[in-house]
Image (spheres, helix red, strand yellow):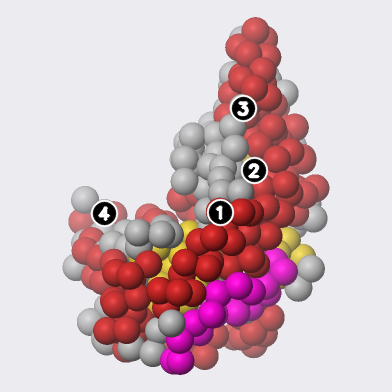
Amino acid sequence: MYEMGKEELRAVARVMKQRKFFRYGGAETAAFEREWADLLGVKTAIGVTSGTGALICALQAMGIGPGSSVLVPAYTFVSTALAVTAVGAIPILVGIDDSLTLDPVDMERKIRRHTACVIPVHMQGMPCNMRAIRRLAKQHGLRILEDCCQAVGGSYGGRRLGAWGDMAAFSFNQYKILSCGEGGVVVTSDAKLAERAFMAQDGSCSVWPETGVMSEAFFCGGSFRFNDLNAAILREQVRRLDCILTRLRRIRRLFMEGLRLPAGFRLVETHDEAGNCGVCFLIQAPSEAAAVEAETLLKEHVSLHRPINSGRHVYSAWGVVSGRVGGHHPDWDCFKHPANRAIRTNYDQPMTQTDDLLKRTLLVRTPYEWPDSKVRRTIATLNRILV
C-alpha cells in the first residue's frame, strides 16, 4: 500500500451511515466490480476475500480439479501453489527467466497430457512474457489464469495485466499496490466462467434473488464474499492507481538510467518496461559471491534483498507442497487422490537455473516516498560504492 487518506475515511463513513455492509443490498461492491472491469477492459469482475480466494474461485470456474496438473512458477508466493492443491489438482513447478517470471521455455518442457492450466505470475510487478505463454497454451489446449496479485495496474503490450488470460486474480492486502487491508477480485471476459466464479465465491448465491438468472447450473461453492466496506475503500484506492504507478515508474527509471554498474553486473530489462509496475528493479550479478558482496555494500542505502532469501516466495520453502501434504483429511489430500496417481510431481528435481537466478539477483525496492533529490544523491552514492 502506497497511499491512504481522508478519501478512504469518507468512503468508510458513507457506508457506515448507510449501515449496509453486505454484498447483497449495498451498492459499493457492485460499483467497484463495474469500475474494475472497465479499468482492465474485461467484461466481468467479482470481488472476493483475498487473492488466494480469487485463484481458488477461478480454478473452480475453469473445472480444474483431481486428475489435472497446473503449471506454477517456482518463484511466487506460496498461495499460488496452495490454490491448486485446494481444488484437488497438482501443482507442477516451472522455472523462471532473467525477469524472475515464468520461463516459457521451461513451461513447454513441463507440459504433459494431464496439464490443464498455467498460472503466469506477474511477480513483483513485472509482466510475464504473455505472447509466448499464450502461444504455448493455445498449442496445447491449456487454460491461462493470470496471477496479478503483485502487479495491480500493470500492463503488457498495451493491455492491462489480467486481460490476457482466460481468467485473472488480484489481491488488495496490506502489501499490495492498492489495499483495503485484505481483499481480492477475479476477472474474466467469458460469461460461463464468470457465472461459475460467482457461484464458487458464494455457495449460497442460489438462494439470493440479487443473483438473478444464471445460464449455468448452480453448484456447491464456498464463502469468499466481498463486502461494501472494503469495496468503498478500494473505489478510492483505484482513483489513486495511475498516479501511484506514474511515480513508481519514474523513480525506477531514474535508478535504471543513473546507475553505473561494474563489469559483469547488469540491470535486467523486463518483458514490457512500459507496463512494469515499477515497484522494484533488478540487478544481476555475475556470481552468487558477487551478489552477496554487493548486497552487503548497498543495504545501508537502499532496501534490497536476494530473492533466494525471501522464504515465502521460493519453492524450496513450501514444505507442505514439497512434502506432498495435502488436505488434513486424507480424502481431501490431492497428493493421495486416486485421480492424481499418474501425475508425477517434480519437487525433488533440481531447478538449477531458477536457484542460480534467485541467488545472484538483487531486488531493489523503489523508494516511493523519496524526493527526486534524495534519489539522485543515492544513485551517486551507489555509483561510488560499486566502482
- Amino acid on which the number 1 mark rests in the picture: Lys
- Residue lying at 73% horizontally and 49% vertically, measured from the top left: 242
Q: Mark 2 points at which residue?
A: 46
The residue carrying pointer 3 sits among few (fewer than 14), some (14 to 19) or many (20 or more) residues within 10 Å by Cα, namely: few
Question: Which mark sits nearer the N-terminus, 2 or 4?
Answer: 2
The amino acid type found where label 3 is placed reads: Gly
**Image coordinates for residue 89, horizontal then vertical, percent:** 39, 66
Identify the mark nearer the N-term, 2 or 3. Answer: 3
Do residues under tags 2 and 4 come within 8 Å of each other at their CB atoms? no
Q: Measure how far apart labels 4 and 3 are at the Cα level.
A: 41 Å
**Residues in magenta?**
256-277
Give the number of the mark in front: 2 or 3: 3
User: Circle 4 sits in a helix, a strand or a loop, which is it?
Assistant: loop
Q: Residue 172: x and y, percent?
A: 54, 43
Q: Residue at x 55, y 34 (%)?
A: 180
Q: Please, what is the three-letter code of the amino acid marked with disc 4?
A: Gly
Residue pointed to by mark 1:
374
Q: Is 294 above or below relative to 123? A: below
| Mark 2 vs mark 3, CA separation in Å | 25 Å
- Label 2 amino acid? Ile
Res 327 label: 4
Number of numbered discs present?
Answer: 4
Q: Is residue 324 above or below residue 187?
A: below
Are dots 2 and 1 in contact, CB under 8 Å?
A: no
C-alpha separation, residue under disc 2 versus residue under disc 1: 41 Å
Across and down, in percent, residue 224 comes to 50, 38
The residue closer to the viewer here, 45 or 238, is: 238
Image quadrant where residue 76 sits: bottom left
Residue annotated with mark 3: 5
Determine the CA span between mark 3 and mark 1. 24 Å
| Above-or-below relation of 380 to 94 | above
